[in-house]
Amino acid sequence: MLATFMAILPLALSINPATWIGDNLNIIGDLTLKNITIPGTHDSGTYWLSTTPMPGDTSALWEDIYKLADMVDRDAGIIAQEWAQTQDQDFYQQMQGGIRYFDLRAGWQKNTKTWVTFHFVEGSPVQYLLGNISAYLRDYPKEIVIVEMSHFEGFPTSDDITILKTMVQNTLGPYLAPVDLTFSFTINQMISTGKRAMVTMEQAFDMVNIWPPSAIYNTYADTPDLKKMIQFNNQTVNTFMKGTWPETLFKISWTLTANSETVLESVLPWKSHTLLQLANHANKALPSFDTEMKNYGWKMGNILIIDHYENSVVLKTVCGFNNIPY
Ligand SMILES: *[C@@H]1O[C@H](CO)[C@@H](O)[C@H](O)[C@H]1NC(C)=O
Ligand SMILES: *[C@@H]1O[C@H](CO)[C@@H](O)[C@H](O)[C@H]1NC(C)=O
Ligand SMILES: *[C@@H]1O[C@H](CO)[C@@H](O)[C@H](O)[C@H]1NC(C)=O
């Protein structure tokens, strides 16, 4: 009897990141997306990057990347990769790790006529990322996902953007959640209807099954300074808790952003050399912030995103906000 109890105890007390939504419908099933916090990644598709600059990406950091490349005699494309990569798992692996929101940046590669993800430099075809999501939803029928498609760089025409929209519809079609900005549908309803993917697009949204960009309200501190980021998010969570934020999901970013100084200082041995290292610095500070939020009875928005997620407590943090034992 005792042995049996001991044997099932670890299972009963720890969540399975691959199935954490479906496994906890007794707790979150009757709630809506407005009532829970979903864990997500920032610049989700950067697990693989080429060294080819994305046409139309006008980030001010490019100037510093070229300056540094010149200074240390290295390839600018490789330095760009180091300051662009925020994740090291593909979308299927991220979903297995519990991630349920993707920040999918899509750029038009006009030479090859393909949509690719990017951050400074070009990454995988968007088709691969959507294919991973579709495979996951097929393999795990009680899991849901939110996808925010933005940053349509590379000077696409409206026909090119239609190609992207058609790709979303062809790849995720049966899973696309119909647009309903009242957000009154529950997680159980998403699962029972199979409409488990909420997808927003910066352009070409149709208000039928492609959601408008306004359905997600973005916030981020835009600083490499950890203290400033913590202060910013403390205020942002306070703002979130005070409002009802109709027709939108409130997104909070536990991320540090490199600036000119961060990139140029990376020649110094004691400074961060890559964006993943900068992320690790942010991620170490999440547990104590999480404890403080829980003491106030605050929740970190409807979507909480992070860099280098598997090196963080993001899943544990959101489970706490969702009253799911971790
Ligand atoms: C869920 O969110 C709605 C607003 O969308 C709110 O009216 C309701 O009280 C919330 N329910 C719970 C259990 O948090
Ligand atoms: C996910 O996408 C990657 C390419 O980015 C691919 O190599 C992998 O096979 C895909 N996984 C699944 C399960 O479809
Ligand atoms: C967060 O804000 C509260 C006041 O709203 C303040 O008392 C607390 O010290 C702040 N915490 C951090 C980590 O900045």
Image (cartoon, rainbow, N blue to C red):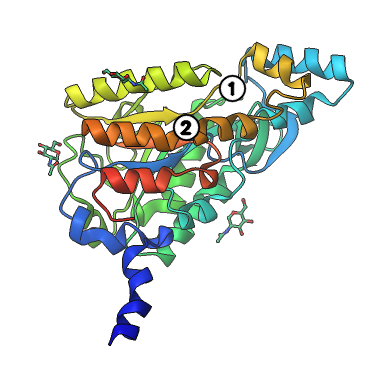
Residue 243 position in % (x across, y down): 18, 23
Ligand 3 contact, mark 2 (Cβ < 8 Å)? no
Judged left or right of residue 191, residue 134 is right
Q: Residue furthest right?
A: 73
> Tag 1: Cα neighbours inside 10 Å, few (<14), some, or many (≥20)?
some
Question: Would residue 19 be found to the left or right of residue 273 on screen?
Answer: left
Q: Give the number of callouts.
A: 2
Q: Residue furthest bottom?
A: 1
Q: Pick the quarter of the image with the C terminus.
A: bottom left
In this view, 35 is above or below 158: below
Mark 2: give few (<14), some (14-19) or many (20+) Cα within 10 Å: some
Q: Which structural element holds mark 1?
A: loop
Image x and y of residue 282, in percent: 52, 30
Image quarter for ligand 3 = top left
Task: State the residue in front, 192 or 157.
Answer: 192
Q: Is residue 211 visible?
A: no
Q: What residue is drawn where x is 43% and y is 35%?
A: 286
Q: Read off the residue under disc 2.
A: 285
Give me the disc on residue 41. none
Q: Residue at x 34, y 44 (%)?
A: 318
What residue lies at 49% left-to-right and 46% top-to-bottom?
167
Query: Which one is in front, 105 or 37?
Result: 37
| Residue 58 drawn above or below residue 20 | above
Q: Residue tagged by mark 1?
A: 155
Q: Amino acid at mark 2?
A: Ala
Marked residue nearer the N-terminal end (1 or 2): 1
Using residue 190 as the reference point, say whether residue 280 is left or right of it.
right
